Image: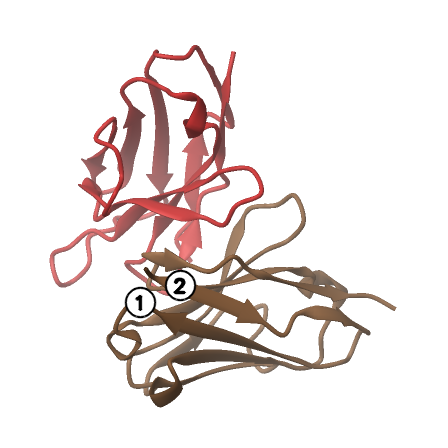
Chain colours: A brown, B red
C-alpha cells in the first residue's frame, strides 16, 4: 500500500522556522518526482515546490522562493521542506505528493504570534 | 504562469444523474514532448486530494469508470456519468506542463 506521511507541522511565530518531513513507502520513492502542495484554510490548492528524482532539478513558487528549501534522501525514502522566515500567509496544510499520483494526509502549519 | 479557470463553482446534482466540470487554461497545455499534462483531482470533505485523471483522459488506478476526461489544447472536461453519494467533494483541474504547476479554483459537487 502506498503511504506518504508528513510530519513536522505546528504553531510557529512569524519569522520562525519549521522543517517538514514526508516518509514514503509502498512505491519506488527514488523513481518519483516529488512535490509539496499547500492548502490554506478553506482555500484551494497551491503548488509550493518540486524536486526531481535525483534532486538535481528544483523549482519553487515565487511566494516561497528564497525562504523554503526542498530536499530528499532516497536512501531514507524521505522528502523534506525547510521553511524559514515564515509569514502568516504561509499558514496552511502542507501535502507531499509523489508527482500528483500519491498524496499524504498533510501536516498543518500555523504561523501566528 | 498558466491560469486555470474552472466552471461552474458549484454543481448541485441529483443522485444517479450526470455531472460535468469544465476547465480552461490561459495557454495551450501541449508539452514539447507531445503530451498534455492536464489532471483532475478529487478532494472529499476532510480528505487530501486524490488523483482521478491524468494526461486529459487516463483514469488512475482504482478510479471508477463513471469518471471520464476529455479535451485538448486549452479546453478540458471532467464528466461523472452517474453521480454517487461518495462523489461529493471539490474537484480541481491541474496543469503540470509548465512550472509553476497551477490548479483551477475548484468545483464543489454536492447532492441536491
Q: Are marks 2 and 1 in contact (CB under 8 Å)?
A: yes
Residue B79 in percent (x, y) is at: 29, 26
Q: Which residue is mark 1?
A: A26
Relative to A41, residue B32 above or below:
below
Query: In which chain is the residue bearing label 1?
Result: A
Indicate the quadrant where residue A100 lies.
Answer: bottom left
Residue at image location 32% in from the left, 87% down from the top? A56
Indicate the quadrant where residue B92 lies.
Answer: top left
Residue at image location 25% in from the left, 51% down from the top? B29
The C terminus of chain A - image quarter: bottom right
The N terminus of chain A - image quarter: bottom left
Query: In which chain is the residue bearing label 2?
Result: A
Residue A20 in percent (x, y) is at: 58, 76
Residue at image location 43% in from the left, 10% down from the top? B14
Indicate the quadrant where residue B66 lies.
Answer: top left
* A12 with respect to B14 (left or right): right
Q: Which residue occupies the foreground of this view, B36 or B54?
A: B54
Q: State the CA–CA distance, disc 2 to disc 1.
A: 6 Å
Q: Which residue occupies the foreground of this view, B60 or A45?
A: B60
Q: Which residue is mark 2?
A: A3
Residue at image location 36% in from the left, 35% down from the top? B23
- Residue occupying the far right of the picture: A113
Relative to B6, residue B38 above or below:
below
Q: Secondary structure at mark 2?
A: strand
Mark number displayed over residue B65 = none
Q: Residues within 10 Å of mark 1 (few under 14, many from 20)?
A: few
Amino acid at each position: 500500500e502506498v503511504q506518504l506521511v508528513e510530519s513536522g507541522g505546528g504553531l510557529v511565530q512569524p519569522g520562525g522556522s519549521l522543517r517538514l518531513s514526508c516518509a514514503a513507502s509502498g512505491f519506488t520513492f527514488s523513481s518519483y518526482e516529488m512535490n509539496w502542495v499547500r492548502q490554506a484554510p478553506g482555500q484551494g490548492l497551491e503548488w509550493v515546490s518540486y524536486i526531481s528524482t535525483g534532486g538535481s532539478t528544483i523549482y519553487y513558487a515565487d511566494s516561497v522562493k528564497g525562504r523554503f528549501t526542498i530536499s530528499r534522501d532516497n536512501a531514507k525514502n524521505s522528502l523534506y521542506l525547510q521553511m524559514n522566515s515564515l509569514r502568516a500567509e504561509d499558514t496552511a496544510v502542507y501535502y507531499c505528493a509523489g508527482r500528483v499520483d500519491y498524496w499524504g494526509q498533510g501536516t498543518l502549519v500555523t504561523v501566528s504570534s | 504562469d498558466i491560469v486555470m479557470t474552472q466552471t461552474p463553482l458549484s454543481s448541485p446534482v441529483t443522485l444517479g444523474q450526470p455531472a460535468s466540470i469544465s476547465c480552461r487554461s490561459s495557454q495551450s497545455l501541449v508539452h514539447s514532448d507531445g503530451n498534455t499534462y492536464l489532471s483532475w483531482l478529487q478532494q472529499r470533505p476532510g480528505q487530501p486530494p486524490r488523483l482521478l485523471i491524468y494526461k486529459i483522459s487516463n483514469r488512475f488506478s482504482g478510479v471508477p469508470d463513471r469518471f471520464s476526461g476529455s479535451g485538448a489544447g486549452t479546453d478540458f472536461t471532467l464528466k461523472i456519468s452517474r453521480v454517487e453519494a461518495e462523489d461529493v467533494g471539490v474537484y480541481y483541474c491541474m496543469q503540470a506542463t509548465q512550472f509553476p504547476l497551477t490548479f483551477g479554483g475548484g468545483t464543489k459537487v454536492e447532492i441536491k
